[in-house]
Every structure is written in C-alpha cells, then in structure tokens.
Image (cartoon, helix red, strand yellow):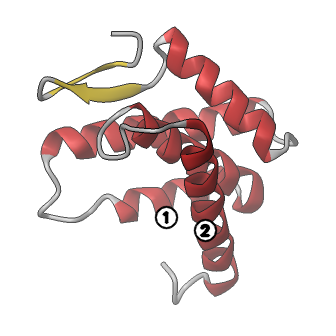
C-alpha cells in the first residue's frame, strides 16, 4: 500500500499520529483493546477518510489488521471500530479532528464502538 500510494501513506501516518495524540489527551487507560484503543482506531479512520477518501482509508486500515499473530478478538474489535470511524467521517466529511474526537467519545459512551471486556468483544456501553 505504501509503495502504491506514497502520498496517501503520508496522510495515513499523520492521521495515526493525530489519533494517538488525541487518545492520550482523553484517556488514561485502555490503550490495548480497551475504550482508548477503540477511540484510536475510529479516530485514525475518520481522519484518513477525510484526507484520502473512504475507499483508500478502508484499504489501508484493513491491510494494517493482517498480522497473523493478532488475536481474533482484537482483529474483530479493530475492524469494527475502523468502520465506525469511516462512517463518522462519511456522514460528516468536512469536520475538523476535534469534532471527530468529540463525536467518537460520545459514541463510546453511547455504546456505538466495541472493546474487549473479559476476553469478549462487547459494545462500549457494557
């Protein structure tokens, strides 16, 4: 993906950094398979969707989840939250990152994203 789309790959990297920064400013725990991780994936995909379009954002995000050593529950959670982030940005394509971040935090509270609790993938209001 990076070789085929070098310009877009730079946007993917920038969006990753934005998502990580916004995650650490809003969450103090849950960075691995928790609600913060759900936020990070959704935020990364919202940002990418705005910057490079939904199709390429989906391709980059899905390629990122192809690690054969990744746990099935983590992959399921990540793919779902990636999709939620792309949906948020598709529904509101011209928003700024803070708007996306606030929307994602609200959706986490409402149970629209997923995380891992007691070894199972569940909605974030559980």
Rendered position, 114 above or below 111: below
Q: Position of residue 104 (x, y in %)?
A: 61, 29
Question: What residue appears at the point 87 percent right and 42 percent down from the top-left corner?
Answer: 94
Give the residue displayed 66% in from the left and 32% down from the top: 88
Callout 1 crowding tier (Cα within 10 Å): few <14, some 14–19, many ≥20: some
Secondary structure under tag 1 reads helix
- Residue highlighted by disc 1: 60
Number of numbered tags placed on the structure image: 2
Query: What is the crowding at mark 2: few (fewer than 14 residues within 10 Å), some, or many (at least 20)?
Result: many
Front residue of this view, candidates 6 and 96: 96
Residue bearing the label numbered 2: 12
Q: Quadrant of residue 120?
A: top left
Q: Position of residue 79 (x, y in %)?
A: 37, 43
CB of mark 2 within 8 Å of CB of mark 1?
yes
Q: Earlier in the sequence, mark 2 or mark 1?
A: 2
Q: Quadrant of residue 67?
A: bottom left
SS at mark 2 in the image: helix
Residue 35, above or below 19: above
Q: Position of residue 126 (x, y in %)?
A: 33, 10
- Camera-nearest label, 2 or 1: 2
Q: Provide residue 24's location: percent of width, then percent of height.
A: 55, 48
Q: Quadrant of residue 92?
A: top right
Question: Residue 113, relative to residue 79: is it above or below?
Answer: above
Judge from the rendering whether residue 102 lies leftward or rightward of residue 65; answer left or right.
right
Which residue is more in the foreground, 27 or 40? 27
Q: Which mark is residue 86?
A: none
């Amino acid at each position: 993906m990076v070789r085929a789309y070098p310009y877009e790959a730079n946007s993917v990297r920038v969006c990753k950094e934005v998502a990580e920064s916004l995650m650490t400013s809003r969450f103090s725990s849950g960075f691995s398979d928790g609600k913060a991780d759900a936020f990070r994936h959704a935020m990364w995909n919202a940002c990418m969707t705005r910057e490079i379009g939904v199709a390429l954002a989906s391709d980059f995000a899905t390629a990122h989840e192809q690690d054969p050593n990744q746990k099935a529950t983590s992959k399921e959670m990540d793919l779902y939250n990636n999709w939620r982030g792309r949906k948020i940005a598709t529904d509101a394509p011209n928003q700024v990152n803070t708007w996306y971040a606030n929307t994602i935090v609200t959706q986490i509270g409402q149970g629209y994203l997923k995380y891992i609790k007691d070894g199972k993938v569940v909605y974030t209001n559980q």
